[in-house]
Amino acid sequence: MSPRGKGEGAIYKRASDGMWCASVELPNIDGKRRRKVIARKDKAAVVKLLRETQAQLAKHGNLATSSTTLDKWMTHWMDDIAPLSIRPKTLAGYRTVVTGYIIPLLGTKRLEKLTAQDVRRLHQVMQSTPKDPALRGLDKVPDSTVMLSSTYALLAHNALSAALKVALREGKIHANPCDLVDRPRARNAGQKALDVDEAIQLLQHLATRADGPLWATYLLTGARRGEILGLEADRVTDQLDLSWQLQRITDISKAPADWEYRHLNSTLYLTRPKSRAGWRVVPLVEPLKSILALQVGDQKEGLVFTRDGRPWDPDRATKEWNAVLTEAGLPPDVVLHGARHTTVDLLYEAGVPEAVISEIVGHSSRAVTRGYRSRGNSKQLTAAMDKMSKLLEA
């Protein structure tokens, strides 16, 4: 007798308990034979369920063979599967939304019972939850209450989708309900930036501060917070090699095998950017070239910028930046990341093409600063930085 093909079923009465059963052949995974067995007391009920099961198999191409709850799967995924492919910083964010929202809201549901409506409910609940924990659980919150952002809901969606993608691959579900739902749109809040006159005012003030070179480097390169805090002396020549960044990582016990990192101090690490597109070189032109030459001096290795001889804490740098702005008589609500926006604005004002701007600041797509290619024409990049610097000549 030839083996049954996918979707074919056999009906039989189980001797152990007298239940009528139907066995449906499913696609093999990794060469292993898979079957789905259904059981009912009545033969007619099994026949009906068999036809429904075969219809579902024909529609989806696969079916789940085992049942587990979402909370058990998410815990297993976070502890044993995700660390092998997801960076610790990203995984830490996923853990927050998984333990705070996904498991409390959907954890008791069986994986194969999850629906698109469940995913939409997750979005809705999160975006109607007060950002202030003290306001949660109240029957009525003030009209001015700030709710969790769509960006936070997007993080939860991404975590759930990633976990269910693995479940789908392993045959535990026949479809990923996250694929059937529009992802929450990340909030585009628009950060404030310094204009040309304010940038000049800040540079003049920085000349009076011992840590002025740190903040001037942000303003004159458009680099990210961790890229400058993690800058090393041997990567400062006629160019800045921004191929590492400083990050605080609280749990690095498990990490992807291909992820590069170097331990600095306590929970501070140097890590590679998320993609090779972020490994870029920024030309050094005046005045930053002279500023950094004085800062580096005879130093051959180690971090260019430290605080009391130790690496800067990223959060402390953010707070100190606000203090610097206040001291300079400038709006303190221009966040450190806003220095990147200032650099972009200055480059636009200097007439630098969008593609070159994107390459300088390391944006990943043209939708961000409209195009980004890593390590392009050095002369073109240098000319662009020169144009921007001339705008800042007081």
Image (cartoon, rainbow, N blue to C red):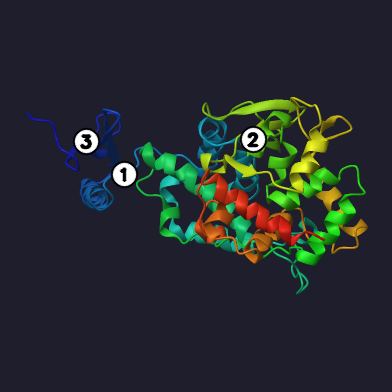
Q: Earlier in the sequence, mark 2 or mark 3?
A: 3
Residue 155's place in the image compared with 260, above or below, is: below
Residue at the spot 77% in from the left edge and 57% down from the top edge: 335
Q: Quadrant of the C terminus?
A: bottom right
Label 3 neighbourhood size at 10 Å, few (<14), some (14-19), many (20+)? Answer: some
Q: Earlier in the sequence, mark 2 or mark 1?
A: 1
State how far apart marks 3 and 1 are (Cα).
23 Å
Q: Which residue is mark 1?
A: 63
Residue at the spot 51% in from the left edge and 58% down from the top edge: 366
Kind of residue indicated by mark 2? Trp
Q: Position of residue 285 (x, y in %)?
A: 70, 47
Callout 1: SS: loop
Q: Position of residue 239 (x, y in %)?
A: 65, 39
Kind of residue indicated by mark 3? Lys
Q: Position of residue 347 (x, y in %)?
A: 64, 60
Of 347 and 372, nearer the camera is 347
Q: Quadrant of the N terminus?
A: top left
State how far apart marks 2 and 1 are (Cα).
44 Å
Of 319 and 110, nearer the camera is 319
> Contact (CB < 8 A) between labels 3 and 1?
no
Of 159 and 344, nearer the camera is 344
Residue 153's place in the image compared with 249, above or below, is: below
Question: Seen in the image, is 118 located left or right of residue 252?
Answer: left
Residue at the spot 52% in from the left edge and 60% down from the top edge: 370
Q: Which labelled disc corresponds to residue 244?
A: 2
Q: Which labelled disc corresponds to residue 13?
A: 3
